[in-house]
Image (cartoon, grey):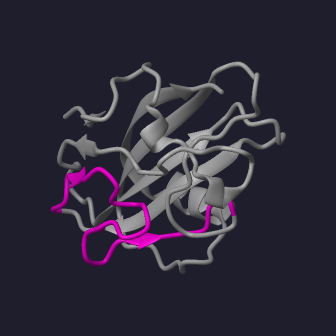
Amino acid sequence: MTFTVSSSSFKDGDYLALTHAGSADHGFGCNGGNKSPHLKWSPGPAGTKSFAVTCYDPDAPTGSGFWHWLVVNIPPDVTELALGAGSPGGALPKGALQTRTDYGFAGYGGPCPPEGDHPHRYLFTVFAVNEVLGVREDTPAAQIGFNLHFKTLAKASIMGLFKR
C-alpha cells in the first residue's frame, strides 16, 4: 500500500500563496494570512492509531531548521484537514492536539523567510502513527520528532516554496 498526501491549496513543488504565509502577529516582518493549507491523505496502514502533521523549513538560517506546525493525535479515521484548520479559529478534528512550534506557540505559523533570501522549502508531512502520543500542547518540536521517529508506520510529504 502506498501512503500519499496532497493539497487543494498548492501542488507539490509550487509556491505557497501569501494566504499561507506568517502574519504580522508573529514578528519577523511578514504580512500573510497565516491560514494553514488544506491537506488530504490516504488511509493509514494496518495498525494506525493516529495521524500527525508537521510543517518544517529545513532552509531556515538557524542551524536546525524551523518547525512551523505540529499536530498530533489526529483520529485514525480522519484523512483530511480543511483550509485554516490549524489557524486561530480553525476546526481541528476532535482529539487532535497542536503542539509548540519554533514560533513559541501551539498552532500553525506560516512561512516567513528572511527578506531577499533564496526560496525556502516547507515540508508538510503526514505520519501514520502506531499509537496516540502522550504529549502536551507545550511539548517541544524536537520531542515530537523523537516520538514520531520511533512510532511511525508510514509517512508522506508535499513541499511548498516561499520567498520574500
Observer able to see residue 74? yes
Q: Position of residue 117 (x, y in %)?
A: 76, 23
91 within the magenta span: yes
113 within the magenta span: no
Magenta stretch secondary structure, dominant = loop
Q: In this view, does 52 lie to the left or right of 142?
A: left
Q: Where is residue 133 in the image (x, y as percent from the top left)?
A: 45, 73
86 in relation to 117, above or below: below
The quarter of the displayed image where residue 64 is located: top right
The quarter of the displayed image where residue 77 is located: bottom left
Who's the residue at 42% across and 61% down the image?
87
Front one among 83 and 39: 83
Quadrant in the picture for the C terminus = top right
Front one among 132 and 74: 74
41 in relation to 158, above or below: below
Q: Is residue 26 left or right of residue 156?
A: right
Who's the residue at 59% across and 56% down the image?
145
Front one among 74 and 3: 74
Q: Is residue 116 left or right of residue 18?
A: right
Who's the residue at 47% across and 23% down the image?
15
The stretch in magenta equals: 77-103
Q: Where is residue 38 in the image (x, y as percent from the top left)?
A: 29, 45
Observer able to see residue 102? no
Q: Where is residue 120 in the image (x, y as percent from the top left)?
A: 63, 27
